[in-house]
Amino acid sequence: MQIQDKVAASRVKEAIAASQNYLLSIQYPDGYWWAELESNVTITAEVVLLHKIWGTDRERPLHKVEAYLRSQQRDHGGWELFYGDGGELSTSVEAYMALKLLGVPQTDPAMVKARKFILERGGISKTRIFTKLHLALIGCYNWRGIPSLPPWVMLLPSNFVFNIYEMSSWARSSTVPLLIVFDRKPVFLTDPAITLDELYAEGVEQVRYELPRKGDWTDLFITLDDTFKLAETLNLVPFREEGIQAAERWILERQEATGDWGGIIPAMLNSLLALRALGYDAADPIVERGLRAVDNFAIETADTYRIQPCISPVWDTAWAMRALVASGLAPDHPAVVRGGEWLLSKQILDYGDWAIKNRTGKPGAWAFEFENRFYPDVDDTAVVVMALNEVKLPNEKLKQAAIARALNWITSMQCQPGGWAAFDMDNDQDWINLIPYADLKAMIDPNTADVTARVLEMLGECNLSIDARNLERAISYLKAEQKTEGCWFGRWGVNYIYGTSGVLCALSLIAPEKTRLSIEQGAAWLVGCQNSDGGWGETCRSYDDPTLKGQGASTASQTAWAILGLIAAGQATGKFAKVALERGIGYLLETQRSDGTWDESEFTGTGFPSHFYLKYHLYQQYFPLLALGRYQAISELWR
């Protein structure tokens, strides 16, 4: 072995040890790992609005939100959808609204800068539907400009061409309560009462409160909306009260004991708004429990207060365990044993909304959050299974039974095209994204390459099997999803680097010979988009501009994904991209900090492509550790 190789191996070993020590130091006593899940400022702004509407703002440290919002405003005056995006209109309007609700005068220099930014981009009239909805709740926008959601939608049977279960789980849990809000069209008084007339670029007297027409067939939806509005005006909405009652019952049935709805802030806020519109009191146990659940998503520091859109302890725990074991921690190390036993305790054995379409599956999955009985997901479940498979627990029989349950559930969730979606099966009626209400284009949950890849990786990693025909369908689906450049789209991570890494890790384990050409093309694409500093990065803008695939400032998490994909491809084909791998590892070694951590400002997680992005604060920790561990294993073979 050459001296240079010895030095490199020593550096990798030291980096692994430092990273392991950091992860072990932040494990919670109960066994889980959990770090902040960051999004844009709208989540916090909407929580300010919620508490102002309920009159519960003085019971929370909302005065600290002002400092948080000021810290997030950029020099151009706006607030960002994701790091470095140049500012986004709807995000900026909601931040401005929140600051005004907190008593900041519009003459404040920060507000002056924000107002200039907002007006230059068209003002309130150009914002998204959900921003206008929040403004309408306090009289700063007219309900005439909001799409109608007739409450009788709740009464449509599950076998009808459209019903609430044709919406994605996140859209469903957020929309059902809005059926009540949109019907009641409440305007709440706040303290202080505010107006936002100064944010209408055309002047508040000139605003046209109407839905924009595109001049194509989708204008039929606008015509239909006009019909709904006319029926509301004439009080001719059929089954109106029955629909409202069904929506209220649905909301109450789906509240967790912890107060959560759907495990996500939009569903929680909208459910609380619906209860407010129905006349519930703030002291009602259901409301009190719901407000406390929102509090549990808060992060408070000495000076600031902000709200996370969701929390990710199951996801973080499973990945941390995988990274620790892959990097050399013993499978029976007390830390991963505690993590494994905690994960076992979180398996969901209740039927959820997934059972509406999946009539054969039995419970046995995991959700993303601490508690979310109704919405477990395939991605979390597959990663948890891999994490459990890699550790040795005191009760191995219980572990194996849990894995068997999870495998059966995942198998039952396969979609007709052959892949897997996140929360539902065959939730793919894309026309729903064209209705006026759906301007975030996130109303459905179709099967995707990244989730499908995770399932196949689980099968290969854990030596599990499913029906051969179903396996072949899944492989064919992934092959068909490969882009001409050789990459795969990433639905839940940014973006093609994420998707390509996941598929390579799957195909290399499950069908290396049959998909050799696809694997080689994917690996070549990854090598081709490596940055000059040795790392990899991809901007969130690649969701809007395909020419930006694989392009962006290097980050620790995306570099790790690329390394993992290249290692998997090399193991499958015997052709390792050694130079690219060594440069990538070099980037991770050079950017690791003295405490064993990595830092990145970029958002590399995806909520809704083009509209909502996430920064998982542990992505830059456990993915690099996983990559270093796997690199160490293969580099020993090279020497």
Image (cartoon, helix red, strand yellow):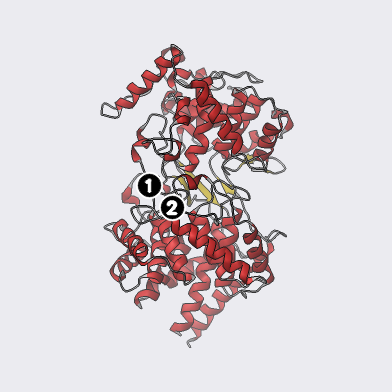
Q: Are marks 2 and 1 in contact (CB under 8 Å)?
A: yes
Residue 622 appears in the figure? no
Horizontal side, residue 247 vs residue 146: left or right: right
Q: Work out which residue is located at the far bottom of the displayed protein and give it.
A: 1
Kind of residue indicated by mark 2: Val
Q: Secondary structure at mark 2?
A: loop
Could you say which disc has been placed on residue 494 in the image?
A: 2
Residue 306, picture quadrant = top right
Kind of residue indicated by mark 1: Tyr
Question: Of 397 and 475, which appears nearest the observer?
Answer: 397
Against 258, residue 186 (above or below) is above
Residue located at (53% from left, 40% from top): 40
Residue 376: x %, y % from top left:
54, 51
Residue located at (33% from left, 61% from top): 473
Residue 207, picture quadrant = top left
Against 433, residue 598 (above or below) is below
Task: Bin the neighbour count of mark 1 within 10 Å (Cα to Cα): few under 14, some 14-19, many 20 and up.
Answer: many
